[in-house]
Amino acid sequence: MMENKLGGFSLCALWFGASVSLAEIMTGSLIAPLGIKTGIAVILIGHLIGTLILSVTGIIGFKERKPALMASRMSMGKYGSYLISLFNIVQLLGWTAIMLIQCARSMQSITSELLGFDNFAVLVIGIGILVAIWALNRDKGISTLNNIAVLLLLVLCLVMLKAIMGQGTIKPIDSTISIGLALELCIVMPLSWVPLISDYTMSGKSLQGSFLGSFVGYFVGSSFMFIIGLLFALYTGLSDPVSSINSLNLGYAALLIVILSTVTTTFLDVYSAVMSTLNLSPTINRTNLILLFSALGTLLALFFPMEQYQNFLYMIGSLFAPAFSVIIADYFLYRADRSGHIFNLPGLIAIVVGIATYYLVLGLDLVIGSTIPSMLVTVLVYAAARSIYAALAPAHLTHDTL
């Protein structure tokens, strides 16, 4: 557990920093076919929904003073929380790899022009080492350094936005996307942080600061990054943010944006993969885990198929929207605590149905996206499964699982 308490400003800066990344810019560029007005409206609505889910989940961590995946034991039971931990570790390794790939690709063109060097593997390894150093010092006052880095990032991003707007007229976009799929991309991005948020709100100074700091930091930062990606694509005609950044001729400022945005986001992925692992085995040395996950993420970055990025986002939504629907319902509606139980069978049934619902609705391409229908169905199925299981299960099984 982190020794230093985090105030609302520190949490706001932390989540703003987490949202300032090339991945967010890249995802925002996918929404460009909707145009400026519709695109921005979808970005804001989607982030409002996703960030509310994120921040509400963070309340659990603050009140229980437990990391996210340990807190999930209260709903899912011991082995149920293990399953969620494994899913989370997989997605965090995926995010670490994606962030390192985007960073290295952006640095290639910049360093080639500025320094005459563009070796992809060396750049991936170098930024991976920097991420590990950042994560290793998470408990040693690096939050102050992180706050400074985030403020610098904000200034640099404003410079970048001004450069974008100076590109002239809007360019035609060849690709298409529906409002429903665009909305889903905006919801999924904050949803991907849901398994992590309590790792930080558990050290919050106040409930209000934990909720508002997390909400404002991520909502403002992520919406801003998505809008930058949207404008990148519309004003440059380039869907790839790497090419867009390089086209602005920002020199060392662009290099600093790329490095800082990657480090202030990716160290959270590594650190929270460690916290998820500690839910599985609390005795493992944290420093060794940080080094292990930094190395694994760096190695994966050398082979990750970036063409599957959008499907990776949908996978995250399909898993965590149902899972945390059960966790939130248990904590705020049923006020149940199954920390000493083996697993939550009605919860697992509801999650499976919720995952199936997510992909079914995704295929239907509804204007409301897939997350909201999936969560509603999950909660309804969970309520029904709880009632049926309580009525049919033997008393000793009910005690262990419900």
Image: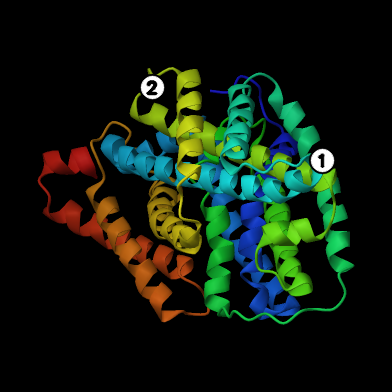
| Above or below for 292 versus 230 | above
Rendered image: mark on residue 38: none
Q: Where does residue 97 sit, x and y in percent of width and height?
A: 51, 44
Q: Which residue is mark 1?
A: 151
| Above or below for 350 versus 263 | below
| Above or below for 242 versus 212 | below
Indicate the amino acid at tag 1: Leu
Q: Where does residue 200 sit, x and y in percent of width and height?
A: 59, 34
* Residue 402, visible in the rendered structure: yes
Q: Quadrant of residue 122 in the image?
A: top right
Disc 2 crowd rating (10 Å Cα; few below 14, some 14-19, many 20+) is few
Viewed as shown, does residue 278 lie left or right of 16?
Answer: left
| Above or below for 306 versus 61 | below
* Residue 63, visible in the rendered structure: no
Q: Where does residue 123 sit, x and y in percent of width and height?
A: 62, 38
Tell me the SS state at disc 1.
Answer: helix
For marks 1 and 2, the one nearer the N-term is: 1
In percent of the image, x 67 and y 38: which residue is there?
264
Q: Which residue is mark 2?
A: 282
Q: Where does residue 213 sit, x and y in percent of width and height?
A: 70, 43
In percent of the image, x 50 and y 72: which residue is there?
369
Separation of disc 1 and disc 2 at Cα?
Answer: 35 Å
Of tags 1 and 2, the one toward the viewer is 1
Tell me the SS state at disc 2.
Answer: loop
Q: Viewer-proximal residue, 169 or 200?
A: 169
Indicate the amino acid at tag 2: Pro
Instruction: Classify the position of the C terminus by image quarter.
Output: top left
Disc 1 crowd rating (10 Å Cα; few below 14, some 14-19, many 20+) is some
Q: Viewer-proximal residue, 46 or 176?
A: 176
Viewed as shown, does residue 354 lie left or right of 157?
Answer: left
In percent of the image, x 57 and y 47: which residue is there?
101
